[in-house]
Image (tube, rainbow, N blue to C red):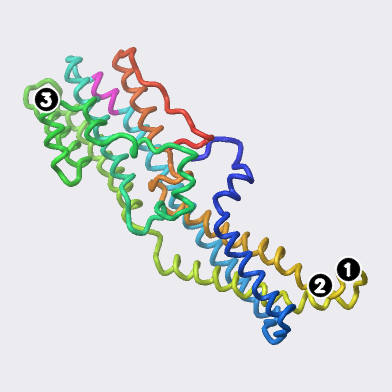
Amino acid sequence: MHVGKSYKLSEFLIWTRRKIYALLVLGIIPVLLYQVMGIKWLAVPWTVVALLGTATAFIVGFKNTQTYYRTRDAQQVWTNILNSSRAWAILSRDYLHDPEKTRTLIYRHFAWLTAMRYQMREDRIWEGTDKRYNAEYRRYYTIPEKETTLETALEKYLPDHERHYILGTKNKATQIMGMQGKSIRELYDSQQIALAQFMEMQKALNNFYVQQGQCESIKDAPYPRQYSVINTFFVRLFCFLLPFGMLQEFDKLNSSLEGIMKGNMVWLVVPFSVIISWMYTSLEQVGESTENPFEGSANDVPISQMCRAIEIDLREMIGEQDTPSYLQPRNNIIL
């Protein structure tokens, strides 16, 4: 997530520069064929291009709206996780009279958060992090889950026997929450918590399961491929036809001009077609970057920072002084 005032134009141009290069080629070739080689029949009626541009604008806007909703829903789920985690700390601290058992429940919750964020950062085939322009842009920010292994991250929160068991399971977050359920059952059986307290803590665990399922739903259900494909197809077709549709329009301007530009107005097709096409391709790329809010892009929901904030709050609740520091943004981007 970008936490600065705004992206710089230079950053945006660097991110989209490869498409700009392609658009330059698409703009120059029709002008060369039309102006230099005299192939006038290449010109496409402007009405055709305008109609296609209108349809493309609608579908690009639709995609960006839907991908924004995905990111907003992901942000809301993790905000709920943050609030529920604070409530869990209160239950674990106030219902139990054994500080060590309280610490065990809270630290195991940290392990659940850790397993969750690592699970959310796993690669999916439909995600765009491996695309060249996204991979290049990663040098501007840091993905904590790519710098430390899950095994190392869990060492701080789980004893060896629990950690080895969790690392051997497929859905690690689910199994950690299962350990929590087993622990509070043992607390109830040993009469360290009352029935009402047991039910309240079970309800909190069920709530965490719901939130985990919501995260997994966003992670494992991509933006519908049919809409994604048609969006890309329309944008590329429009960018291809745009300079052909502008040839005659700029050529007509020669009749009303004198001087050096007379007879050369067609060359203005190149910059103007690049600018207009760049607007469409950039909108498409922005929509793609918000399509998967956990993949590790610069516009992701900052789940690593939220987990660190939860850890600081909960450790302070149980009286610990040696808490970790908040994650700091790099180039105004924090994950």
Q: Main secondary structure of the magenta part?
A: helix
* Magenta stretch holds residue 194: no
Q: Which residue is mark 1?
A: 260
Q: Amino acid at mark 3?
A: Leu
Magenta stretch: give its range: 88-94
Residue 297: give x, y in percent of width and height: 44, 46
Q: Which mark is residue 187?
A: 3
The residue drawn where x is 28% and y is 28% is 88
State whether residue 281 is above or below residue 263.
above
Do the numbered discs 2 and 1 sit on residues whose CB atoms are within 8 Å? yes
Single out the mark in the foreground, 3 or 1: 1
Q: CA distance from mark 2 to mark 3?
A: 85 Å
**Residue that protrudes farthest toward the bottom in the picture:** 41
The residue drawn where x is 73% and y is 78% is 36
The residue drawn where x is 56% and y is 73% is 237
Closer to the camera in the image, 189 or 57: 57
Q: Amino acid at mark 1?
A: Ile
The tag earlier along the polypeptide, 3 or 1, is 3
> Is 262 situated left or right of 123 in this image?
right
Q: Which residue is mark 2?
A: 264
Closer to the camera in the image, 273 or 47: 273
